[in-house]
Image: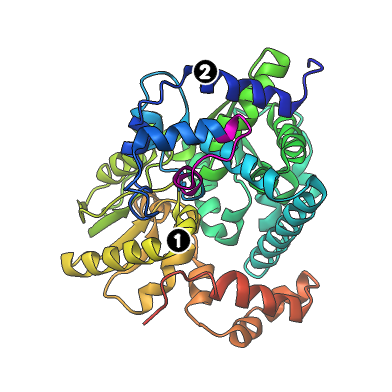
């Protein structure tokens, strides 16, 4: 590792992209955030020129700052660029530059640390309300599971943090890998954080430290590959942390592959395991931010006997549902329109890929004539695998006190404070509802 700091390495990458950018504006023209952000009146060339101005220490025009703040990480800008620039990365660095202008590092660090601690608490409590110690250990949440195995596994499976709130999804991923005969070590949760909270909060040094630490822990598989679940972690690692480390050390620590793309690469091996017919008309809830994942999900679903995949012809934007929070009214409109389209189409289930989508949508199952499922539940059903969706079961109760009472055995087992559990349920589960229930 060279003496170059993480932030210096990031800055050098920004400088190269700024120099390579021709200000053609194609990235702006391709971006689905422009209209809902209310900046269609500004020229695309002026908007991207303003982004470069901010990155060089200026203020940039208001339309450019609005564009950066409204980034949903859809990734359309990356596909639109003909010059090897990653506009999504530049917008992330623009938001950091704006955060640095607004407050000094100590304040930014305190704010990011508070957000990280709150998120860590919510992940821990919500997972413990659903799982006993043994299952939590299988998901890498106990010290024994974090130890380096005696024999290097084929892969490291990196969960990220927030999928642990909906643990049936992560457990199905492990069950499917077991059926495929893949060996793996599970890592994730707050102790293996990607550093995205610190990064977005403008604490680049801490983000680099946390991400580098997690990358070092993950660099021990036979294949030199990490299978990832969380799209936010994937973008943070592959577009920010790993390129910076590569500049510092001269080598990439590993390659990272999203789980659905990993499954599609093994579709010939997976297909014979899809033995059970699943007679359902389903629609796929889509977010295109990680290239190839939605196509992989559709291809896998179509390999399942009995599945009819229905196109609802709704917009697909953003990295995952949580990233649309920068445009809350637009987000609610998208969800409302999709639910109505799903009802009109007479489908049996609206099927999401990512965990944040599932958390936000699952309680709508109460109000609409179709189920809300995760893609791995459909795959698992065809393979004879099932995991109970305890998160949805609890959220459908819509009552924090009732949920606490229903989880009292696990609250006692994990020695959870009841008041803390109730608060996390109220704020971290029931309030995680961008489009209100009927």
Q: In this view, does 8 lie to the left or right of 355?
A: right
In this view of the protein, can residue 86 be seen by the observer? Answer: yes
Foreground mark, 1 or 2, reads 2
Above/below status of 65 relative to 403? above
Give me the residue at 65% from left, 78% from top.
407
Which residue ends up furthest to the left in the rendered image?
345
Q: Quadrant of the N terminus?
A: top right
In the rendered image, which residue does mark 2 sit on? 19
In the rendered image, which residue does mark 1 sit on? 358
Q: Under tag 1, what secondary structure? A: helix
Q: Earlier in the sequence, mark 1 or mark 2?
A: 2
- Tell me how the rendering is colored: rainbow
Residue 196 on image: x %, y %: 64, 44
Give me the residue at 32% from left, 48% from top.
40
> Quarter-wise, where is residue 414 in the image?
bottom right
In this view of the protein, can residue 223 be seen by the observer? Answer: no
For the residue pair 90 and 338, the one nearer the viewer reads as: 90
Q: How crowded is mark 1: few (under 14 residues within 10 Å), some or many (20 or more)?
A: many
Give me the residue at 48% from left, 59% from top.
325
Query: Over which residues does the magenta segment extend?
Result: 54-67
Q: In this view, does 358 lie to the left or right of 333?
A: right
On whether residue 65 falls in the magenta region, the answer is: yes
Q: Residues within 10 Å of mark 2 (few under 14, many from 20)?
A: few
């Amino acid at each position: 590792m060279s003496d170059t700091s993480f932030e210096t390495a990031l800055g050098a990458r920004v400088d190269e992209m700024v120099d390579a950018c021709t200000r053609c504006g194609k990235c702006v023209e391709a971006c689905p955030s422009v209209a809902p952000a209310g900046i269609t009146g500004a020229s695309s060339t002026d908007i991207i020129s303003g982004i470069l101005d901010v990155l060089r220490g200026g203020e940039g025009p208001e339309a450019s700052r609005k564009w950066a703040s409204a980034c949903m990480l859809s990734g359309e800008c990356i596909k639109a660029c003909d010059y090897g620039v990653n506009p999504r990365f530049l917008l992330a660095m623009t938001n950091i530059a704006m955060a640095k202008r607004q407050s000094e590092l100590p304040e930014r660090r305190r704010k990011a640390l508070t957000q990280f601690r709150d998120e860590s608490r919510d992940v821990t409590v919500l997972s413990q309300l659903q799982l006993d110690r043994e299952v939590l250990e299988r998901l890498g949440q106990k010290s024994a599971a974090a130890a380096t195995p005696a024999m290097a596994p084929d892969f490291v499976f990196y969960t990220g943090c927030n999928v642990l709130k909906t643990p049936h999804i992560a457990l199905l991923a492990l069950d499917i890998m077991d059926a495929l005969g893949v060996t793996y070590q599970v890592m994730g949760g707050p102790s293996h954080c990607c550093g995205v909270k610190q990064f977005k909060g403008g604490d680049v040094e801490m983000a680099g430290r946390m991400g580098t630490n997690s990358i070092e822990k993950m660099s021990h598989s036979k294949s030199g590959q990490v299978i990832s679940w969380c799209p936010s972690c994937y973008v943070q690692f592959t577009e920010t942390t790993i390129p910076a480390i590569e500049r510092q050390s001269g080598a990439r620590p590993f390659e990272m592959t999203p789980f659905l793309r990993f499954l599609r690469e093994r579709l010939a091996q997976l297909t014979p395991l899809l033995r059970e017919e699943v007679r359902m008309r389903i629609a796929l809830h889509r977010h295109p931010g990680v290239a190839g994942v939605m196509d992989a999900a559709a291809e896998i679903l179509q390999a399942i006997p009995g599945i009819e995949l229905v196109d609802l012809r709704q917009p697909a934007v953003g990295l995952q549902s949580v990233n649309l929070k920068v445009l809350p009214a637009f987000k609610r409109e998208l969800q409302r329109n999709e639910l109505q389209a799903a009802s009109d189409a007479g489908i049996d289930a609206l099927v999401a890929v990512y965990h944040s989508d599932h958390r936000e949508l699952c309680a709508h199952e109460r109000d609409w004539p179709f189920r809300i499922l995760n893609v791995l539940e459909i795959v698992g059903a065809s393979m004879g695998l099932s995991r109970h969706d305890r998160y949805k079961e609890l959220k459908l109760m819509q009552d924090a006190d009732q949920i606490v009472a229903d989880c009292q055995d696990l609250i006692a087992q994990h020695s959870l404070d009841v008041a803390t559990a109730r608060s996390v349920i109220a704020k971290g589960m029931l309030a995680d509802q961008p489009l209100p229930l009927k």
